[in-house]
Each structure stands twice: as structure tokens, then as C-alpha cells.
Amino acid sequence: MPDSKSGGKHSIRSMTDAVNELRDFAGGENAGESRGEDASPKDASPKKRVYGDESKHRAERAEKTPRRKKKKRAKKRPGLLHRLLRTGKRIRRGDEERQLTFFGHRLSFWPMFLAVFAVLMVLVFLLNSTNLVTDQQNVTLMGLPADLENYRILVLSDLNGKRFGDRQSTLLRQIDTLNYDIVICLGDMVGKGGDAEPFYELLEGLPASKKVYFICGDSDPGPYVDAVREESAPLSQLVLADWILGSINRGATYVDRPIALTVGASTLWLTPSEMLNVDAYASSNLWKEQMSQEESGYLAGVVADKNTLPFTSYRYQLAMDQLDSVNTMNDADVHITLSHVPCSDSFLTAACGHSPTEGKYLSAPDIALAGHYCGGVWNLPLLGAFYVPDSSLPRYGWFPDQSVVSGLRQIDEVQQYVSRGLSNCGDIPLMPFRLLNSPQVSVITITATLPSSMLE
């Protein structure tokens, strides 16, 4: 028996080997066959770990199974959108003096930039919808009578039922700073909404000493009622729309026929543009014949003629007033025609081609005033207005020549001025606000003095 002092680990291993040999001898040949003489070490039964051999066992296991190295995961870089929108990490107290913070969080550059940009854009929209500007425009007319030198016309257009302050106080304050003789409203003052109160508030706030003249726009309620009023009143009160009568009751004059204004010893004519190329003699005969037929039907009890006769009679009066004006106008008079939609070049050229000796057409206008375009509603930097609602223009109004969008332009013998208006065009519902396009009031000054650009 070996001495315990001479190595206990070796003695224990020798005893284990002896036990294994006895087991093999007791199993016989079958046991040997079952194991297989050529069996690989993998098929042999695993050696049991013996107590006291722990350090060597760990070393053997380390040799068979090398330690796996942990792979370092690459940090995923945040996307661009995430980096733009993140508010920043919470900062340490020591960094507070060097960082711009908001409730203890560092503010990143891009979120702050986007927030400031959004606020500025909102302010631009608000300012462009309420910041009124005034356009002072001189119109030079050769041979202008001395009484009409520096005659000033305040031009308003396209209110479309909008309010500038309580009872139009902001708009009226702007107007009170201006020097003018008469006021001309170029249509769409009521708009598609049909609420005439904002226009009434403007009329009531204007000085009573200033005459106001207005026309109907394409977005306004029609100038005539659907059915004639059953009452005893002047013909105009039977057929004209309520908002027109309401405006007349507040001191304004509806321009649906030629109107002569006396200024000293001179005459200034205001006419609706739709009468320019109308043969007044033929028109008056046509409406007279129509009126005679309806009078006969009315006396015979025809209901349809009873309903249409007042409208036909009113149109006959307009034609007769036009014919009288054709025979009254002379070359010394100043003629201003009013149109909601700007007149086309061909239309004004045709008006200039009529012979005064024919006695059929109104004389060519000296000035044409119009609105409707509202300055294109949306203006882009460097480009200007990219659309105006006028199918008669090239490209149906897309990317128009900026000279036709607003301002003064010479067409044949006529100078046409187009106002940028006060609100939005009713024909463009997809543009509910003005962009880089301030609301505008205009003062047209008639003068015989040549502009300085022509004197240089």
C-alpha cells in the first residue's frame, strides 16, 4: 500500500484503473465487442471527474473549448430624421453655462432652426393678409383739361366680404390718410358668401363728401333678382339685387350705364366696360322691339311676359342711356371705363377702332380700371405670380407676363390699370390666403405732366 505522503493523487488514479480492468474482465468478449476494439476515443465512456483534480480538469477543458471572444456591436448611427428632431441629451451641471437649455435639456441646432422658421412663416402669412399697402399711380393724359389736373381716384377691389378690423376700422384708417376725390369699387366687394355687411360697413365709414361708384363682379350675387318684386316702386328697385339696393341706400352709385361727372367746366365719364363694343343704336332697337312684344303678352294675360317685362324695360333704359351718351361725348371729355376682369388687348384695340362719326359706339376710353386677379394671390420669390384666373391669357393664365398681373400698362390708346385688390380671388378656392402679396388700395392721379422717366 503506498504511503499517503508520497502523492495521494497518483494512488487514487491507480485504484481507479484497477477497478476499470476488473469490469472489462467480468463483461467478457461481448462487452469487448460492444465497445469495439478499434473504437475511437470519442466512443469510449467519458472519464469521471475525480475530486481533487479540479485544476487539471479546468485546464483540459480550456484546451478543448477555447474561450469565445465577444464581438463588439457597432453602434447604429441614428437616421437623419431622428437627428433633426431629437431634443438633445440631458446635460451635466458643469455644462449649463456653455449650453443653451430648455427645461434642463440641451437644444439641438436643427430642431431650434425648424421651429424658428415655422414661426416666421406664420408671421409672414399673418402680415401678408392684414398689412395694407397703398399704390400711388400717376396716369398721364395728353390734352387733359385744367380742371382735371391732379384729379385723384381711390380704387378698391375684391373685398370679398372680408373685414379689416372691427367695422373695417383698419382699412378706414388707411384710407383716411389718403388724398382723393372719388372712390371706385371694381367688383367682388360682397363675394360668393353673399354677406354684404362688410361692404356696407366700408360704405358707412367713408366720408359722406366723397362719392362712391361701384360695379358688380363675377363672384358677387347677380345684379338682378330671380323674380320681379311685387310692389309699386321705380323700375330699378323692382329688378336690382338686394345688396345693390342696400349699397345705393348707403350713398353709393351703381355703374351699369354711362355716368357723366362734372368737374368745373370739364366732364369725366364713367362707363361699364361691357358697353364699349356694343352698337348702341342696334341694342336700343332690339330691346324696344322685345319690350313691345312682352307688353302685348302682358295685356293678353301671358304670365311669362308679366315676369320678364320689368327686366326687359330696365335693359331698354340702359340701351337708351348708352345711345344718349354716344351722342353727348366729345373729344375733350375724359373717359374711364370700369371692368372687374381686366379687358383683353383685342377688346380694347377694337374699342379704339370705332369711328366717332358713326354715332353707334362709345368713344375709346382713356383709362380702363380693373381688378379680379388679386395680384395672383400667391407670389413666389423671384418669380412673382404663377397663376391668374383668365383663360384668355397665354397658357390659360399659368405663368403670366407679370406686367398684366397688376399695375399700369399701355394697350393701343388706352392705359389699363389692374389693382391687386384686398382679399382673395373667388375663382381660386385652392388659395385661401395671400402669400407674399399684401392687400392693396390704389390712388390713381390723372395728370398732363409727363413722367420723369420720359423726360430723361
Image: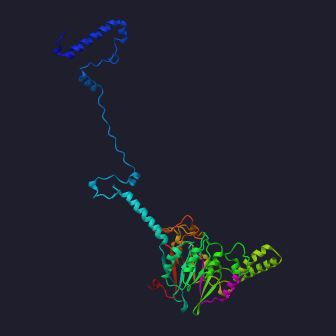
Please name whichever residue, 451 or 185, is drawn nearer the observer in this view of the structure.
185
Q: Is residue 261 inside the magenta stretch?
A: no
Q: x, y (%) of residue 234? A: 71, 82
Residue 179, relative to residue 241: is it above or below? below
Q: Is residue 99 visible?
A: yes
Report the label total.
0
Please name whichever residue, 38 or 178, is drawn nearer the observer in this view of the structure.
178
Q: Is residue 174 left or right of residue 227?
A: left
Q: Quadrant of the C terminus?
A: bottom left
Picture quadrant of residue 108:
bottom left
Q: x, y (%) of residue 331? A: 61, 89
Q: Residue at x 54, y 80 (%)?
A: 205
What coloring was used for the rendering?
A: rainbow
Q: Residue at x 75, y 75 (%)?
A: 308
- Seen from this angle, which residue lies furthest right? 300
Q: Is residue 333 inside the magenta stretch?
A: yes
Q: Is residue 403 visible?
A: no
Q: Residue at x 35, y 6 (%)?
A: 29
The part of the chain drawn in magenta is 315-342
Please name whichever residue, 239 or 271, is drawn nearer the observer in this view of the structure.
239
Q: Quadrant of the N terminus?
A: top left
Picture quadrant of residue 299:
bottom right
Q: x, y (%) of residue 61? A: 28, 25
